[in-house]
Amino acid sequence: MYSHILFPTDGSDCADAALDHALEHARTYDATLVALYVADVREVGYAAPALSLERVREALLESGEQVLGRVAERAREADVEVETVVTEGTPASEIIRHADEQEADLVVMGTHGRSGIDRYLIGSVAERVVRGSDAPVLTVRQESS
């Protein structure tokens, strides 16, 4: 049923909750897990104007490599074939683009479960992916503490 499962992650607890589901689906269907980290550098100049854009970009990309290293380790422990991709851009757009390019059969991603004014003001990457992806999207809500 599934041969390529896309798992976008930002390394958050929310994404970690979704990783368990992604690994379970990949193991069940003997699918390749493609772990994706999108470095969003659009707002860096506004958020940290005193820092060099290139320095911040490099730090974000390095962080992505570390996050994906942890995902790859968990996948190997679960006996799941894994590929990792670090890219730059707008998270929702990049996730949708990679799902199309990788011909993903399923996208598994975390969602914070925001509602009301928070969702309206902050937006939801998961919601944009659900609306824009041709592949089915399994969203996993972070458990409340």
Image (tube, rainbow, N blue to C red):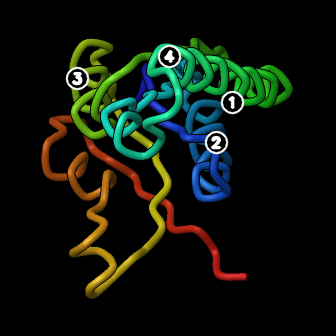
Q: N-terminal of the two: label 2 or label 1?
A: 2
- Residue 87 placement (x, y as % from top left): 42, 16
Q: Residue at x 68, y 48 (%)?
A: 20
| Horizontal side of residue 97 vs 76, given as left or right | left
Q: N-terminal of the two: label 3 or label 4?
A: 4
Asked if one can make out residue 1 in the rendered structure from this viewpoint, the answer is no
Determine which residue is flagged by label 3: 97
**Amino acid type indicated by mark 2:** Gly
* Placement of 96 over or under 123, stated as above or below: above
Residue 99 image-quadrant placement:
top left
**Amino acid type indicated by mark 3:** Arg
| CA separation in Å, label 2 and label 4 | 12 Å
SS of the residue at dot 2?
Answer: loop
SS of the residue at dot 3?
Answer: helix
Q: Residues within 10 Å of mark 4 (few under 14, many from 20)?
A: some
Q: N-terminal of the two: label 1 or label 4?
A: 1
Determine contact: label 2, label 1, CB under 8 Å: yes
Determine which residue is flagged by label 1: 67
| CA separation in Å, label 3 and label 1 | 20 Å
SS of the residue at dot 1?
Answer: helix
Residue 38 image-quadrant placement:
top left
SS of the residue at dot 4?
Answer: strand
Q: Residue at x 13, y 43 (%)?
A: 132
Determine which residue is flagged by label 4: 86
* Placement of 39 over or under 101, stated as above or below: below
- Residue 32 placement (x, y as % from top left): 54, 18
Q: Nearer the viewer, mark 3 or mark 4?
A: 4
Determine contact: label 1, label 4, CB under 8 Å: no
Q: Residues within 10 Å of mark 2 (few under 14, many from 20)?
A: some
